[in-house]
Amino acid sequence: MNPPKTLRIAAVAIARDATAILPTESGDFQIHAFEMNDGREAMAIVAGDVKNKEDVLLRVHSECFTGDVMGSLRCDCRAQLKKALVTIDEEGTGVVVYLRQEGRGIGLLNKIRAYNLQDNGRDTVDANLELGFDDDLRTYEVAAEVINYLEIQSILLMSNNPLKRSDLERNGITVNDSVGCITDVTPHNRFYLETKRARSGHLL
């Protein structure tokens, strides 16, 4: 039996939305764009009918301009996004919730500053700390609001990050399992992935 849902920890709601068809190289999807009542934006890329469904395969993906758009090899972001879309297309049903949380929440400018520190030997955690930020400022109440908007009853979370699961659950989402989103290790992202595993608790 599913555990009872808890109250959401942040007062955020969808103020405006738009929907369109999105054909991609990974498959054909429906895209929903959202603006929250606090001005934040998010998207949901949806395959199949997820309304009132249990155990919907779902990835919550935070924006990464350098990886998702530019194809940077320093991280695994683009590879994870691609894997999620392909897997969901193959399953026929699922969702990628895309959040505007660049650089683990520090923004693009500070992310490039962190890159510069990494060029000089810092890992991703120490780079953020040296810039005066926590190692990860991301939150997932917006993702929870999107999931509720889509009327999904429970999810299978495509994530290697246990904090993402616990934050979604605190915001009232029933996560029945974490299925992981493992991608290839390369010489360029090895140190980044080792840091995520050793210092951020990611299941890699």
Image (cartoon, grey):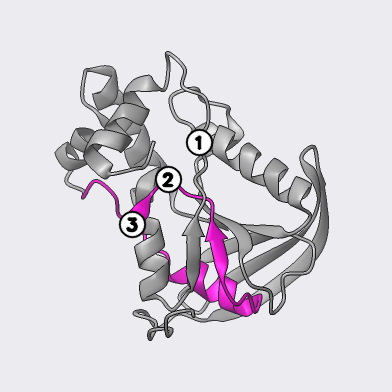
Mark 1 vs 2: CB contact within 8 A:
yes
Q: Position of residue 97 (x, y in %)?
A: 58, 59
Is residue 127 shown in magenta? no
Residue for badge 3:
163
Q: Secondary structure at mark 1?
A: loop
Question: In percent of the image, x 17 and y 41: which residue is there?
Answer: 129
Residue 47 found in image quarter: bottom right
- The kind of residue on which mark 1 rests is Ile
Mark 2 vs 3: CB contact within 8 A:
no
Q: CA distance from mark 3 to mark 1?
A: 16 Å
Question: Around disc 2, counting alpha carbons within 10 Å, would you say few (fewer than 14), some (14 to 19), or many (20 or more)?
Answer: some
Q: CA distance from mark 1 to mark 2?
A: 7 Å
Of residue 110 and residue 157, the one placed in the foreground of this image is 157
- The kind of residue on which mark 3 rests is Leu
Of residue 163 and residue 2, the one placed in the foreground of this image is 2
- The kind of residue on which mark 2 rests is Asn
Residue 116 found in image quarter: top left
Q: CA distance from mark 2 to mark 3?
A: 9 Å
Q: Earlier in the sequence, mark 1 or mark 2?
A: 2
Question: In percent of the image, x 15 and y 37: which residue is there?
Answer: 130
Q: Position of residue 201 (x, y in %)?
A: 28, 44
Question: In percent of the image, x 39 and y 43: which residue is there?
Answer: 103
Q: Which mark is residue 182?
A: 1
Total numbered circles: 3
Picture layout, residue 117 above or below residue 120: below
Q: Secondary structure at mark 2?
A: loop
Q: Residue 135 vs residue 82: left or right?
A: left
Residue for badge 2:
160
Question: In percent of the image, x 60 and y 35: which residue is there?
Answer: 69
Picture layout, residue 91 above or below residue 80: below
Q: Which residues are magenta?
A: 134-163
